[in-house]
């Protein structure tokens, strides 16, 4: 089974049906989630994702606007991260001058045999750590 760790920006694209003025980012995210459901692929998340989503959405919005599409199919999987993973992410973030949370997501995904789905350009510099794709590339 394929496993994906979905970055906050993709969850927000989906929940808020965002667009960049040219591309329908919300639709791309929706189609990605539909493909996951159709193929029974796992979607991973962590408390770090919940914390970031909580800056833009209420807990009710997170459940109803983000996770509901996946929850109904029992494909959403919460993963925990360890102090060792945090330390690894801090080391990578410092050495590559990247945001800590992005490196943490990459470490979590790698350790859970998952692919990162993101639009964040910072992940381009983490391709030696984990595989990264845009939602529409899957």
Image: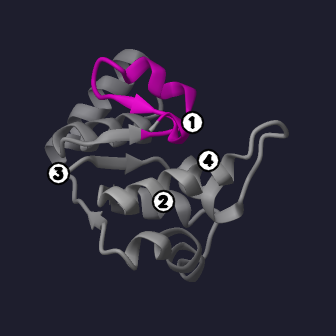
Sequence-wise, which precedes: disc 1 or disc 3?
A: 3
Inter-mark Cα distance, 2 to 1: 18 Å
The residue beneath circle 4 is 28
Inter-mark Cα distance, 1 to 3: 25 Å
Inter-mark Cα distance, 4 to 3: 32 Å
Which residue is pictured at 55% across the width and 80% down the height? Answer: 64
Q: In this view, does 134 lie above or below 69?
A: above
The residue beneath circle 1 is 119
Which residue is pictured at 33% across the width and 36% down the height? Answer: 106
- Of tags 1 and 4, the one toward the viewer is 4
Q: Residue 74: horizontal and vertical position, in percent?
A: 30, 74
- Of tags 1 and 3, the one toward the viewer is 1
The residue beneath circle 3 is 82
- Of tags 4 and 3, the one toward the viewer is 4
Q: Is mark 3 on a helix, strand or loop?
A: loop
Tell me if label 1 and label 4 are in contact, CB under 8 Å: no
């Amino acid at each position: 089974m394929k496993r994906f760790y979905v970055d906050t920006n993709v969850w927000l694209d989906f929940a808020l049906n965002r667009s960049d003025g040219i591309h329908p980012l919300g639709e791309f995210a929706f189609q990605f989630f539909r493909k996951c459901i159709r193929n029974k692929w796992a979607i991973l998340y962590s408390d770090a994702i919940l914390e970031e989503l909580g800056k833009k959405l209420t807990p009710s919005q997170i459940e109803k606007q983000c996770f509901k599409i996946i929850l109904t199919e029992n494909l959403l999987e919460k993963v925990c991260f360890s102090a060792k993973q945090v330390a690894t992410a801090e080391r990578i973030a410092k050495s590559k001058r990247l945001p800590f949370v992005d490196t943490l997501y990459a470490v979590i995904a790698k350790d859970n045999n998952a692919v990162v789905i993101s639009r964040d350009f910072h992940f381009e510099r983490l391709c030696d750590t984990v595989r990264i794709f845009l939602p529409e590339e899957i």
